[in-house]
Image (tube, rainbow, N blue to C red):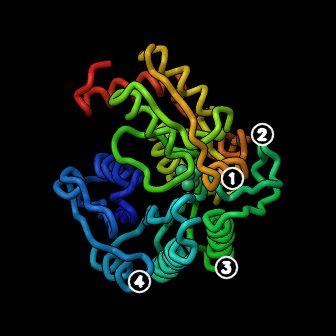
Amino acid sequence: MKRILVTGATGQIGSELTMVLRKRYGNDNVVAAGHRRKPSDELLNSGPFEIIDTTKRDTIEEVVKRYNIDTIYHLAAILSAVAEAKPLLAWNVNMGGLLNVLEVAREHKCAVFVPSSIGAFGPNTPKDNTPQDTIQRPNTMYGVTKVSGELLCDYYYKRFGVDVRGVRFPGLISYVTLPGGGTTDYAVEIYYEALKKRKYTCYLKPDTYMDMMYMPDAIKAAIDLMEADPKRLIHRNAFNVTAMSFAPKDVANEIKKYIPDFVIDYDIDPVRQAIADSWPNHMDDSAARKEWGWKPNYDLASMTKDMLEKLSDKLGIKI
Ligand code: AKB
């Protein structure tokens, strides 16, 4: 039986991943840990919850020892737009936190899941069909921490045998928990605003293409990779994974199929536009498909239908 710790459990991915893991492995076997955001009642009432500041190694180690943890999903991180505003905080949390988690995993023989991101690529990476192994010279603090994190994970596997695995997540869309300060956040906000105001002002240009994924697929990717046969894994860390590639104008057109009077306009934020412009349009995720059977279930059309249905229930607003 697995004994799992999820850091960043109050965040966009963690809040949903924790509930899926609890269903799969038993409520008491999955410890949710947060620090900055307040946990939801669902998270608090369904299993153990602990405060962990991942920049303080002893707070991680104490929980790992007390609960006899053997697997850590390490999700606590600062996202791209906040990282540009607070680069030192991003370095401390994204690198310091990761190093602490890997050290605790080495000492206590834990497996670790670590998400990287499309942010690990930069302006001179090939933009279309971005290969699994390619140029990575990001020009943002977020990207610097993501590439360094990928290398650190490879190092801990090769040097110390820590079973650390991970994917490069694209922008993630969900109706449960809002993302906190990323460049791809527009793709979540647009659904809320479409329902609430029939109008959305987008901070990216209409034709800014990026990889995206619906949260159920992201959770499936994390769990499937951690359960994959290690003998089949050639890469282990930082697998490209994607489900769809779209631009703001595409998601607006899809929403209009359900809300015909929905209007999008644009007020460009130069910081987030520059970050988005430095990321791929569309990654090649064939290594993940081959090595552990990655296959998403949702595309833009099926995600939009589900997002609008679930959000209209949640917000109590009729489509
Ligand atoms: C962000 O926009 O910072 C994240 C990411 C793509 O890593 N959603």
Which residue is disc 1 drawn over?
274
Residue type, numbered disc 3: Arg
The structure residue drawn at horizontal position 35% and vertical position 59%, both measured from the top left corner, is 9
Q: Position of residue 15 (x, y in %)?
A: 34, 52
Identify the secondary structure beneath mark 3: helix
Report the residue that reaches farthest toward the front. 267
- The reply to whether the C-beta atoms of the residues labelled 1 and 2 are less than 8 Å apart is no
Which residue is disc 4 drawn over?
56
Identify the secondary structure beneath mark 1: helix
Question: Which quadrant of the figure contains the C terminus?
Answer: top left
Residue 228 visible here = no
Give the spatial CA distance, label 4 vs label 3.
23 Å
Which residue is disc 3 drawn over?
159
User: Would the CB of label 1 be found within 8 Å of ligand 1?
Assistant: no
Image quadrant assignment for residue 123: bottom right
Residue type, numbered disc 2: Asn
Which residue is disc 2 drawn over?
129
